[in-house]
Amino acid sequence: MELLLRDLAPQALGAVIRRFRDFAAAEDAVQEAMIAAALQWPREGVPNNPQAWLIQVASRRMADHIRSESARRHRESEVALEASRTSAVAAIETRPQEDDTLILFFMCCHPALTPSSAISLTLRAVGGLTTAEIAHAFLVPEATMAQRISRAKQSIKTSGIPFELTTAKDRAQRLLAVLHVLYLIFNEGYTSTAGPDLRRDDLAHEAIRLTRIVHKLQPDEAEIAGLLALMLLTDARHRARTNAKGELILLAQQDRELWNHKQIAEGVALLSATLPKGSVGPYQLQAAIAAVHDEAARSEDTDWPQILALYDLLKRISDNPMVRLNHAIASAMVHGPAKGLELLTALDADTRLADHHRLDAVRAHLLELTGDRNGAIKHYRAAATKTANLPERNYLLMQAARLSSELAVMNKED
């Protein structure tokens, strides 16, 4: 039932917002309706039309909210009429619409907001991510992200700009923000910030589904195709990323027979059709890197010089700490671990990575390659303390334990 409610929430929110055009109040009303469903449905059973049920309950909450505000008393007659028509309208508005969530994404990327605030708000209200997960994606403290989302809601409320369905012009202006929302939802689905599982299938699949819709609507937009290719090429490996016990398996050790080669072929075809069209964006470059990995029959066949060249290009147009971290890894694979460690030193001063486990994890791996087991153990353990994803944490602790065991054997032999 939890998955059902998570799927229905964006659709219900979209319908309530379209009717009442008050984002903050509509979000609260839908949350109350979901709480009511979580309490009532286990006892009484899921209704025949659960989406209409949520919209009806949320609409009643909105009617109560509007009646309670003296500044909106002149709207009471309209609200009463809407409430009486709820069942009929819900039956019309809740017919199956594949892109209901996508419509809401474009609505949430409101012109009163900065791109980062719009993306954060959309991820929280519609994308199904927690504030902590969004903060992790943006490399900021959770408290900072909570304030950003709160300010975004207030900005919409005070802007005077209607919260309504978008025009073709609006969608063109908001496209990049929506693509970034889809990218971050996929990333959280592919490797979750916290929890017992490495991956959240619901988020990864929903991001791919919605990106397919955007691509179908705008097939000639290169970065949309690039994003879809990136998702497909990355997601194609997911069955090989963990073993039967749910333990993490790194890319180099994965059984490539388990990869989804049909999905890889689709991603490569999308990319091949996109790259010759002109300007290349960050999603296309990331997809190209994923394609180089996927097309290598064995890990040792990976064309690391090509990957490094692609990261050099990516750094020029999207110079963020994660890109530079991945660039350091590629440099280490081409020029040796000492070069990678040298590049990591420059990232130590970036506060956005101070609490992120990947910097320590990468440093640990490179130190191990240089033969510095003590240094590697230290950083594997440090990385383990910074991730709340259980398979990742267990993997890092296992690497530290393996190296400690090797050192103990060496010391005994000496």
Image: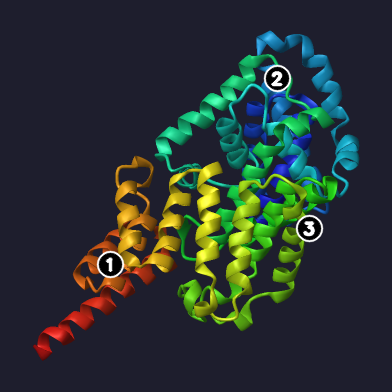
Of 220 and 280, which appears nearest the observer? 280
Mark 3 sits on what residue? Answer: 273
Of 124 and 87, which appears nearest the observer? 124
Mark 1 sits on what residue? Answer: 367
- Mark sitting earlier along the chain (1/2): 2
Disc 3 element: helix
Q: Position of residue 4 (x, y in %)?
A: 70, 55
Residue occupying the point 62% across, 15% down: 158
Q: Position of residue 103 (x, y in %)?
A: 77, 39
Of 136 and 332, which appears nearest the observer? 332
| Image quarter hosting the C terminus | bottom left
- Label number found at residue 295: none
For residue 382, side relative to residue 9 (left or right): left
Q: Amino acid at mark 2?
A: Ile
Tell me if residue 139 can be seen.
yes
- Mark sitting earlier along the chain (3/1): 3
Q: Can you name the residue that lies furthest to the left here?
A: 414
Nearer the observer, disc 2 or disc 3?
A: 3
Contact, mark 1 vs mark 2 (Cβ under 8 Å): no
Contact, mark 2 vs mark 3 (Cβ under 8 Å): no
Q: Position of residue 348 (x, y in %)?
A: 30, 47
Q: Position of residue 183 (x, y in %)?
A: 62, 49
